[in-house]
Amino acid sequence: MNNIIKKLSNKKILTYKEMKEFFIGYLNDLVSDEEMTLCLKLICKNGLSDKEIFDLTDIFINSGDVFPKNSSFIDKHSTGGVGDKTTLIVLPILASLGVRISKMSGRALGYTGGTIDKLESIGVKTNLTKKEFYNLVEKNNMVISSQTDNLCPLDKKVYALRDVTGTTKSVALIATSIMSKKIASGAGKILIDIKVGKGALIENEKQARELARIMIEIGKKYDREVICMLTRMDNPLGDNIGNKIEIMEVIDILKNNKQNNLTRLCIEMSSLMYSLSKNSSYEKGKEMVISSLKTGKAYKTFLNYIKAQGGTLPKNDNDPKYEIKSKRNGYIKSINSMIIGETSMHLGAGRIKKTDKIDYDAGIILSKNIGDKVKKGEVLATLYGKKLDTRTFYNAYKLQILKPKIKDIIIDIIK
Ligand code: URA
């Protein structure tokens, strides 16, 4: 065991056999959390070569069930952000257009939310048997379930440790973690949304491009088509952050009642995924996606999906705890998504520890977003949930006198 630590410290290349012994040893409790933490910290510090990343991905894939490649199975994954509810919008759009899509999603940990918690907040059953899973895809063209225990169990164990040891922000580890799950699940076509910015695991564009490159290379090794979107995560995605509260924004967008950075991202993502799945042009995809939103097809598909998995539509009947009012006049230049995410977590919408219970009604609704004009005393945001000191919440906002130029949420699309 010490050999691998010594080699990593001396920046020597590890062999497949050495990594397999160490990582599978960890899965089987033969390597301790402390030893694995040391290894992960060295990987975060020094990185891994491409060959080591390919080998480690392969070890993760084969740590559990591996489904054969299905060329028509399309999947998406996001590296995680504050207010990210794209799955819940993109899947009904695609399903309404005849793109079959099934997805395994995760729970909230730290300041970013989890799709599964959002669905459970409105009573959607996510712990499905294999039979239920396949019946539901057949019926609605879409299904979302929690991850089975035996899909990349090594990633599950290593990810939980990364989360509590400050070792989440490594290009090599993120690529290995995401691509192993996508490949093991059998997806033939994969869209990855790489979030870049203050509220994301990846803080700069250079790292994001490197992550996109290596994920596309891993895809090639297993004959999978991979598209990476690089998208901004300096500001929260959309206006609602929480669980039930996020579902309310999903409904607004699917009803075609709301245009914001989240709507823009979901339309682009759905158009790309449609064209990838149907081998059509991007323009055709976009036309279909917009029409599904305008005609209410996407919303209807969402309603059928919620009903089929036992959920009910949410109502915002929770009492607001605080209204945060602007202290001055100006335009909103930026909203720090990390502060928003952390506040939402402390209000009760997320978990500080893995065992914490979520308050499904807790969260934040932003009434003003970037680029908006505000007057002193106007409400910037409404907070729901536990009592807390709201002074740091103001630090999330940067105001300026002149109307700021807002950058497009999409930085680049890499194929
Ligand atoms: N999502 C994952 O599944 N793994 C990571 O490492 C980061 C985001």
Image (cartoon, helix red, strand yellow):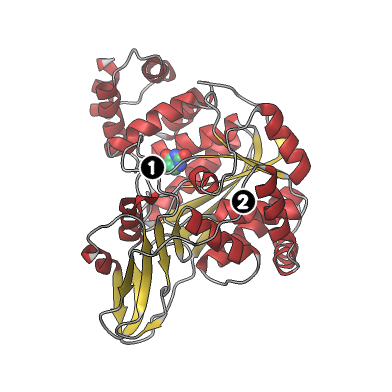
Figure quarter occupied by ligand 1: top left
In this view, the residue in front, 185 or 245, is: 245
Above or below 80: residue 15: above
Q: Is residue 10 visible?
A: no
Q: Residue at x 57, y 60 (%)?
A: 250
Residue 24 point in image, percent of width and height? 42, 17
Give the amino acid at mark 2. Answer: Thr
Mark 2 or mark 1, earlier in chain = 1
Q: Residue at x 26, y 22 (%)?
A: 35
In this view, the residue in front, 137 or 54, is: 137
Q: Are marks 2 and 1 in contact (CB under 8 Å)?
A: no
Task: Please tell me in which quadrant of the rendered image residue 313 appears.
Answer: bottom right
Q: Residue at x 32, y 85 (%)?
A: 330
Disc ID at residue 411: none
Q: Which residue is mark 1?
A: 109
Residue 141 point in image, percent of width and height? 74, 45
The quarter of the picture where the N terminus appears is: top left
Q: Which residue is mark 2?
A: 312
Residue 414 point in image, percent of width and height? 55, 54
Give the amino acid at mark 1. Answer: Leu
Q: Is residue 337 visible?
A: yes
Q: Residue at x 25, y 58 (%)?
A: 388
Task: Please tell me in which quadrant of the rendered image residue 132 appears.
Answer: top right
Q: CA distance from mark 2 to mark 1?
A: 25 Å
Residue 334 point in image, percent of width and height? 35, 71
Query: For this view, does 84 lie left or right of residue 364?
Result: right
Give the total of numbered labels.
Answer: 2
Query: For this view, does 250 lie left or right of residue 340?
Result: right
Query: For this view, does 72 lie left or right of residue 183?
Result: right
In this view, the residue in front, 161 or 57, is: 161
Kindly report which numbered mark, 2 or 1, lies closer to the viewer in this rendering. Answer: 2
